Image: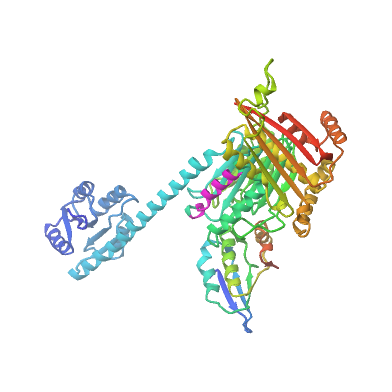
Amino acid sequence: MPKNQKLALVVDDSKMQCKLLSILLQEENYQVIAANDGASGVQMYIEHQPDLVLMDINMPIMDGFEATRRIKKLSGAGNLAPLIFITSLDGEQAFIDSVEAGGDSILVRPFSPQVFKAKIKAIQRISDLVEQVKGLQQEQQNDAELAEKMMSGVIEARNFALDKIGVIKKAATIFSGDIHLSALCPNGDLHILLGDFTGHGLRSSIGAIPVTETFRAMTKKGFSILEIVAELNRQMHTLLPGDLFFAASFACISEHEKSVYVLNAGLPDGYLFNEDAIIKKQFSSSHPPLGILPQLLPDVHLDVVQVSKTDRLVFITDGIVEARNKAGKLFGFPRFESAAADGIAQKDLVKSVLSSLDDFCENCEQEDDISLVDVPCSGWQPVKFSNKVTIPEGFTEEDSYFTREQKGLPTWSYHLHLTGKLLKTVNPIPLVMNQINDLEGAGEHWQSLYTILTELFVNSLDHGVLELDSSLKDSAEGFGQYFKERAKRLDNLAHIAINAPDNFVRISLKYFPLSHGGKMIINIKDSGKGFDIVNVLKGNSNAMNDGIKLSGRGVELVNQMCDTLEYQEQGTLVKASYIWHD
Amino acid sequence: MTVSSKLSTDGKQLVIAIDERFDFSSHQEFRDAYSGVTNLDLTYILDLRKTEYMDSSALGMILLLKDHVQLYAGQLIISKPSDTVRKILEIAQFQRLMTIE
């Protein structure tokens, strides 16, 4: 049978009627099969799966109503073969009964061939529309499933340390416009993102892949969280249509600094809980969602908070607090906060929030995506200290260091001299690390070097060029003040046009290959006034031993990772050497 | 009708008022309320005093309105949002993008 020829089933105990209807249907280009009672009609329906059924009402063995009920049960919602009752029973009851039984239309005898054909055409038109809608629905379903698979299987499965991060993710439609990402920085810090694209379904997923790629690549290269946010905003602004945007919270958790840096752009408050489930800090939205403005607002800033090891950072999207119960009440912040606190006491925040949410909403339909991440502030991959070389006895330094380069010349050197405004706008560390990766290839041993460079550069900039006093950071309040002051002084730096070159930081690297590894000599010089080297370092190490001081940890960490570390030229030049072995 | 709009008699103000719910279902009506208006220097007042619920697609719709307003050198004021709606606008930090009174 050619595909465009449709099949009609005529069920009527009068052979005469069957014949008549068949001729009319054939004139409308249908192929026709016929049955003379309800039971065999049902049987033929099963065997031939017709596109249209014409049904008499009064028939022996099984009447038209019963046959219709069975046929409609068989075809279910998935496949509509329109069914028209043909009857001489006039009156309201016949009409009502036929619709009750599942009939799609009714035609009362006598009727002219023209009326019959018009009826067939009309019902076929509706059936075609239903087919079309079903096809589209199926297509949409397939797309949504693909997007879902991509999101959970490809994007989120590659997140870092999934076992340590508690996650709630319940999508309103199959595909969720929410996304959570985690990635490890070269220095062992952890970057976290929880975001919510406007809308639901496939439309809201346009940005998911670029966001993921950018977040991971930039984190890996050592860009700071604020630089990543700025880039994501730029991308989303270019990519997303005017009414779509990306509300998200970002965090950088630095275990060795014992601090977290947070930016909330358009999500409900984020939380920092301590182990007693007390809220230590709430992070309110301080910036419009990403993708609305071409650039971040000039006053964008990160919240910097001191954390202890047992603290947890919790981000949520609006779906949780806006979840409704049958009475139309919102779940709200107080319920969320108490469920989270209970969860911390029971050591399972996710479970507690979920069960509280389920109890509240019962089986109400979920209107929005619901997401949460619960991230401990410690327990991440420690920065590796194992790269130090232990030199075997009887092995002289010359043997080890300069086997390939007899005269002790570096195979390459690299200098970066940043002045004035660039000190505010450029983060040199990713640039430097890129150079190293290009020249020497990537490797885990550069992780420690990244930390060394970052710490030393930040020291030179903060304490040298910007003349910030690190003792400010000794108290928790001073800590925030320190970062405020830092931002202010950087702004000043950017606005000085005339003597800009007077303010500088110069990074120099020299690389010496060893037989099984290499040695990097790092010199960082700054334009600052310098400091009293002996006293500061001594003070730092005393304080470290007492375990009371918040500042000065950076130098101590670098000292552990370097082979040698010394300050010269009144503290304006720091020289470090770093050795790694295969 | 969940969206109504009215141009003031002096032709300087267009007031767009929204009913209880402002979400994606009002998308077309909301667009129709302003898309034909091309007067320059017009003040657009988005009246939200009756609105109790607003979702993120409504925020997106407001951004589209803002684009339209900027295109015709007008001004956009969001007028009298309820506490709930104001909270949503604040989370999205819309007070930094437009006037909310």
Q: Verify whether residue A332 appears in magenta.
A: no
- Magenta segment: A203-218
**Secondary structure, magenta segment, majority class:** helix
> Residue A316, how many percent across, how many down?
63, 47
Coloring scheme used: rainbow
The residue positioned farthest toward the bottom in the image shown: B10
- The vertical placement of A363 against B29, above or below, is above
Q: Is residue B42 visible?
A: yes
Q: Verify whether residue A215 appears in magenta.
A: yes
Q: Residue at x 49, y 41 (%)?
A: A154
Q: Quadrant of the C terminus of chain A?
A: top right
Q: Residue at x 56, y 36 (%)?
A: A441
Return the residue nearer the eye: A450 or A391.
Answer: A391
Q: Is residue A267 left or right of residue A154?
A: right
> Residue A52, how many percent across, how many down?
24, 57
The residue positioned farthest toward the front in the image shown: A407
Return the residue nearer the eye: A446 or A43.
Answer: A446
Q: Quadrant of residue A90?
A: bottom left
Q: Is residue A329 visible?
A: no
Total label count?
Answer: 0
> Residue A75, how many percent across, how many down?
30, 49
Return the residue nearer the eye: A7 or A526.
Answer: A526
> Residue A534, how many percent across, how many down?
86, 34
Q: Is residue A205 left or right of residue A37?
A: right
Q: Quadrant of residue A217?
A: top right
Return the residue nearer the eye: A454 or A149.
Answer: A454
